[in-house]
Image: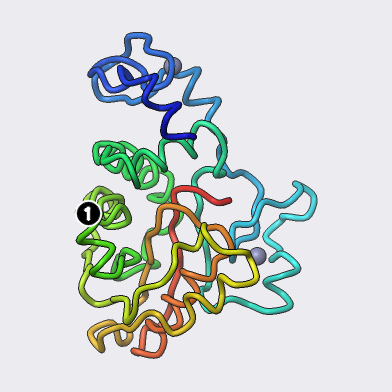
């Protein structure tokens, strides 16, 4: 289990030490320069869905899937691939109550987004949990990631304008073919998003069905544009 493995590196969050290798660094950073460089950053990807593409294919071209059946959202910015060690951090954030990771990675995501999204978004909206799931977990990791992003980019954050209309099975527990049906119509959005350009924030994007269902309900409520910002792309 990923989470079990993380328990063996409990000491990663001593202030002033690298979260991965433990060497001493400045207190403002999370990783030493070497570990930072080794993180699995998304480099060449489809601009619409952030699916990784070979360098020669990715000169601004959308992937075949997006050309055939375009998603409802217009762009996706993903910072990392969902691979080691990012997968472990995401699991710890989601299931291990390591909320401080949301601050660390929210700031990383915001730094990467700042030069790319300036002037293209009016409102940040985290992907909501159903209230039963929220009660069980105690927090929404997407909202916790979105907070430092909104602060860094000086954009308003609204976690009430998009909600789940029914509980759904965890996407990770389902076969790929069942995931679209699982989240279809599972969201609704308030008319306050009308005419706005919205950025939906989530921790991980796998098939994209969840963010697509969320984006669809934002469009139904009148949003002018929806883009997706995720920490990790599977
Ligand atoms: Zn390190
Ligand atoms: Zn694509």
Q: Is mark 1 within 8 Å of ligand 1?
A: no
- Give the residue displayed 32% in from the left and 45% down from the top: 106
Query: Residue 100 or 10: which is nearer the viewer?
Result: 10
Query: Which residue: 36% across, 83% down?
Result: 223
Q: Which residue is mark 1?
A: 139
Question: Is residue 14 shown above or below 141?
Answer: above
Q: Position of residue 44 (x, y in %)?
A: 66, 48
Q: Secondary structure at mark 1?
A: loop
In what quadrant does ligand 1 lie?
top left
Front position in the image: 120 or 74: 74
Residue 42 x, y percent position in the rendering: 58, 44
Residue farthest toward the right in the current orientation of the protein? 56
Which residue occupies 30% across, 52% down?
141
Instruction: Name the one closer to the observer, 89 or 135.
Output: 135
List x then y, in percent, for residue 39: 52, 31
In the shown orientation, is residue 6 left or right of residue 163? right
Q: Residue furthest top?
A: 24
Quadrant of res 187: bottom left
Q: For this rendering, which residue is in front, 208 or 96?
A: 96
Residue 65: give x, y in percent of width and height. Answer: 71, 70
- Residue 142, placed above or below residue 194: above
């Amino acid at each position: 289990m990923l989470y079990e493995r993380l328990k063996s590196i409990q000491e990663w969050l001593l202030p002033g030490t690298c979260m991965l290798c433990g060497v001493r660094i400045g207190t403002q950073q999370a990783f030493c320069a070497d570990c930072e460089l080794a993180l699995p950053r998304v480099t060449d990807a489809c601009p619409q869905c952030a699916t990784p593409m070979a360098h020669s294919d990715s000169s601004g071209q959308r992937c075949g899937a997006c050309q055939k059946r375009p998603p409802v959202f217009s762009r996706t910015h993903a910072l990392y691939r969902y691979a080691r060690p990012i997968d472990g951090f995401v699991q710890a954030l989601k299931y291990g109550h390591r909320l401080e990771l949301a601050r660390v990675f929210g700031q990383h995501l915001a730094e990467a987004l700042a030069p790319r999204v300036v002037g293209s978004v009016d409102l940040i909206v985290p992907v909501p949990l159903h209230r039963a799931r929220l009660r069980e977990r105690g927090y929404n990791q997407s909202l916790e990631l979105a907070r430092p992003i909104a602060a860094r980019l000086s954009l308003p954050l609204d976690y009430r304008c998009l909600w789940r209309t029914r509980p759904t099975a965890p996407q990770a527990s389902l076969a790929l073919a069942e995931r679209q049906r699982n989240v279809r119509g599972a969201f609704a959005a308030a008319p306050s998003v009308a005419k706005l350009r919205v950025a939906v924030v989530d921790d991980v994007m796998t098939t994209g069905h969840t963010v697509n269902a969320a984006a669809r309900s934002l469009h139904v409520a009148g949003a002018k544009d929806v883009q997706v910002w995720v920490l990790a792309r599977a």
